[in-house]
Image (tube, grey):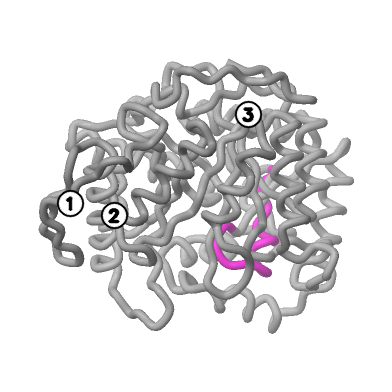
Amino acid sequence: MSNINCTSKNIDGAEVSWFAPICNGDFDYLGQFDDHLKSNWTNTSKIVTTADELGYRNILCPSSYQVGQDTMSFVSAMAPLTQNINLLAAVRCGEVHPPMLARALATIDHILKGRLTVNIISSNLPGEELDSAGRYQRSREVIQILKQAWTQEEINFEGEFYQIKGLKTDPVKPYQQNGGPLLYFGGYSPPGVELCAEHCDVYLMWPETESRLKELMTNMSNKAAKKGRTVDFGLRIHMIVRETEDEAKAHAKKIMSKIDLETGTEIRERALDAQSLGVARQAEMRNQADLDGFVEDHLWTGIGRARSGCGAALVGNPDQIYQKIQRYMDLGIRSFIFSGYPHLEECMLFAKYVLPRLNTVSLPEVYGRRTDFEPHTPLGAGKRS
């Protein structure tokens, strides 16, 4: 812990978030698509409004070229339907010209009255084959232009991908002060780690053993310190919580009961980031698991056989899940993005069994980006600070 420095290390609590499956991927059984769970406005907006009512503090709205809905349109449309929850919009760098992206995000931030957070994505665009260094350099330039647009009177930038001179920025200033929306980032290659250490606020990790998470956090903290910065740490992980451990394990087996090896492989390999270092680390973790798929207590890797990216779940009863989350918080993790299958039902179960025991925070408020927010009282919910 001595080498792990985070901006909110003195905060007694964490940002507890849920996931909006706007890119498809909501299932009763993994790999078995069902029309009643498909990604559409009715289904996914219900998940977001439910998470808001139950007291979650943020919700990840991902991005995909293959399937699903448009992220920024979805986030903007959720503004009048939600009251407290922040929305974490995934943005693929290079998809929208940076000054236009800055304007769009600032506009959405005003519509949300400061409840916008941004997840920086550095994947190749369809048909591209940029190497890791190139992809992260493009993201670096996008972030630098966003910050100029949000904090300065004009953009002046000369980079490898973008050249902009004397572009006036009025009126693209966001609602949030002190730099605009928080930037969340996930990446494991050295260029990605350098980018996050230099420019981003929250480093998002996929599931790993506690010892490997600590290694990632220590490395990032040291990199950021060399640049005179600190970052916070987040964990993106699936959730299966039931009244008993046996019930939780039974549900884990159920959701995987109709997937075959061929279908699972096809699902994992179709994503644009299927060959990334992060995905490779998830596969390595699965290979280290026991015969039931557990790599350490309550960390189950079986779910990764049927999806790309985040490939493990916490499985257990309420006490076990709560204690595991507390262990993560003791490591220095201050943001959690949970999800489960089906998403709406698991969202409600976690809110019933675990969320009321957690002290939850809004990271934009911790960072002083949003100081005029008066929260409504959620229906269920954890302790708020």
Task: Kindly check if marks 2 and 1 are in contact, taking CB atoms under 8 A apart as contact.
Answer: yes
What span is in magenta?
Answer: 298-310
Is 293 left, or right, of 345 in this rendering?
Answer: left
Say which amino acid is labelled 1.
Answer: Leu
Circle on res. 84: 3
Q: Which residue is mark 1?
A: 167
Q: Which sits in the foreground, 231 or 124?
A: 124
Q: Indicate the quadrant where residue 40 lies.
A: bottom right
Quadrant of the snapshot with the N terminus: top left
Return the residue nearer the eye: 40 or 217: 40
Residue kind at label 3, given as amino acid type: Asn
- Horizontal side of 222 relative to 125 (left or right) equals left
Instruction: Identify the residue under disc 2.
Output: 99
Q: CA distance from mark 2 to mark 1?
A: 9 Å
Query: Is residue 276 magenta-colored?
Result: no
Q: Is residue 114 above or below residue 338?
A: above
Q: Label 1: few (<14), some or many (≥20) within 10 Å?
A: few
